[in-house]
Structures are given as C-alpha cells and as structure tokens.
Amino acid sequence: MTETDPRSGPGVGALFDAVADDYDQSGVDFFAPIAQGLVDELAPASGERAVDLGCGRGAATILLARSVGETGSAVGLDLSEGMLAHARAAIDSEGLVVDLRVGDASEPALPEGEFDVVASSLVLFFLPNPGAALARWVQLLAPGGRIGLATFGQQDPVWTSVDREFGPWLPPAMRDPRVMGPQSPFGSDEGMEQLLEDAGAAEVETTTLRLPVRFGTLDRWEAFSRGTGQRAMWASVPADEIAGVRERAATHFEGARTADGDVEVWQDIRYTLGRAPGPDAA
C-alpha cells in the first residue's frame, strides 16, 4: 500500500475528510435506506450495546441509538474527523447519546466481547485486509451477539457502463468496490459468507435489497458521485477528459430514463449476517 492508496488508513481518512461536507447531500436517496435495511436485519433491542464501524455521518448509528434507547449504548467509530463532526451534529439534533470516536475500523480499539450488535455499512471493501478486520470485529461480540455487513451486490447494467468510463485512468487499488469482479469476495454472496465464516462468525446468511436509485438529472448523478468515495474516481481523470466522461455517461443514462424522463437505476445491497461463535468454537 502507498500513502495515496484509498484503502490504506491515511488515504481513506483523507478521502472522507475531503468529501465530508458533501457526503450524502445531493438529495439522492441512497445511504439512508441502505443503513435502514442493515439495522432492520440486525434488529437491535432496547438495552443492547451496539457499535457502528466506519460510521461516517451516522446514517446507521442514529438508527442503532434509537433502537437501543436510553437503557442501551451506541458507539460510532470512524477514521474521518470531518465525517464524525457531521455525525455529532445530526445525533445532537435528535437528542441522542452516542459515543463517537476517531479510530481505524481495521483495528478498532474497543473491548472484546462487549457488544450485542456490530454493524458496518459500505466500509469493509475500503480496508487493506478485510479478513483480518472481520476477525477483530467478530471478537467484539458478546455471547449471542449479531454482526451485520452491508456491501454491494449486482448493479444495473446501465450504471455499470457509466462507472466503466472511469476505468482507463484508475489504478487497481482505486477500483470501485461494485466493479471488482467475481474473483473478489465482494463479488458474490458466497464470497462474503465465506469471509465472515473464516473470521469466526456462526450462522452466517445473506439477504438482499434491490434499491431503486433515482438521480433525476445528470447533474444530480454527478453531485451524488462526487459526494461519495467515488470522488477518488473523478480525481483520477485528467482535466481534459472530464467533459468526455460526462458526455459518455449521458449517453449510457439515456437507457435508464423513466416514463417521466428521470434517470433511475438500481443497485442490489447485500447484507451478510452472522452471530457470535458458540462456546465450543475453535
């Protein structure tokens, strides 16, 4: 890994500090329903202890805090201080109590066996060693605890074609996690399940949400894209090639117009779920 590799610790922190003010502010309904689906699958209960690893601006953290209530506890961990500042503002506006911490999800400085719920939404594929990180996350679970991961599944072919327009300028380490291919554990349900099982989780299973993503206009698609981790994709394109990328994206998106003229595509969200291993696990 190099210092500019977005999967290395400093790279990810710098990327999301840069994007923090714009992250999830384009008006496209994307991160909130993904977080809602993850929390619904984990079904946190009043009084439980929950942690959101790579919490960002707090989409899942807030839902966890609401669910566990005043008798429970919620922790949000993120490498980006900028993202955490926005999470704090959102949490305070709701009058919730959350322990927000700056930290690396690869090696969270949290006590083992202390959490009933471990959640992580759209984070694992940014980490340099996902398997090692997952093994550490499973260790955080208390007996009977649940872990849930949100990652990307299949994607609308139109959106895939748009993303491929960035391909000629992307070094391998910066490939979008949705287009890594079947050789990656992120390329299939089975790959993700094996990754979580190898990390020590039990009762591993997968559920999938097909999320309609309505950009409406091409300008809103670009604002959305630049306001996510995909900002690194845009940064990789030479300035004199940006207009061409936009024009070709517009051509692709003509195949995703709704009856009212809006651009709408879909994205499958994979939820990989497991439980703390039993007392006899090796």
Image (spheres, rainbow, N blue to C red):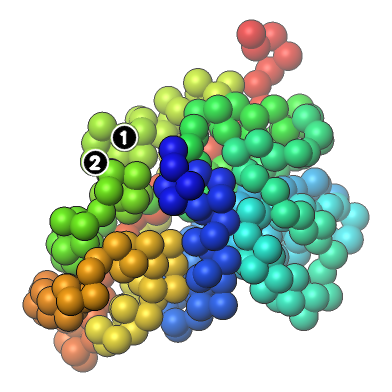
**Image spot of residue 158 (x, y percent):** 16, 65
* Residue named by callout 1: 184
Residue at coordinates 50% horizontally, 44% vertically from top-left? Answer: 8
Q: Is residue 55 left or right of residue 238?
A: right
Q: SS class of the residue under badge 1?
A: loop
Which one is in front, 252 or 94? Answer: 252
Question: What type is the residue that disc 1 sits on?
Answer: Ser
Q: SS class of the residue under badge 2?
A: loop
Q: Is residue 227 left or right of residue 243?
A: right
Question: What type is the residue that disc 2 sits on?
Answer: Gly
**Image spot of residue 172 (x, y percent):** 28, 44
Q: Is residue 144 visible?
A: no
In contact (CB < 8 Å): disc 2 and disc 1: yes
Position of the N terminus, as image quadrant, is top left
In the figure, 262 relative to 149: above or below? below
* Residue named by callout 2: 181
Residue extending furthest toward the right: 71
In the figure, 269 relative to 36: above or below? above
Residue at coordinates 76% horizontally, 39% vertically from top-left? Answer: 109
Residue 95, labelled with which disc?
A: none
Position of the C terminus, as image quadrant, is top right
Residue at coordinates 48% horizontally, 37% vertically from top-left? Answer: 128
Label 2 packing within 10 angstroms: few (<14), some (14-19), many (20+): few
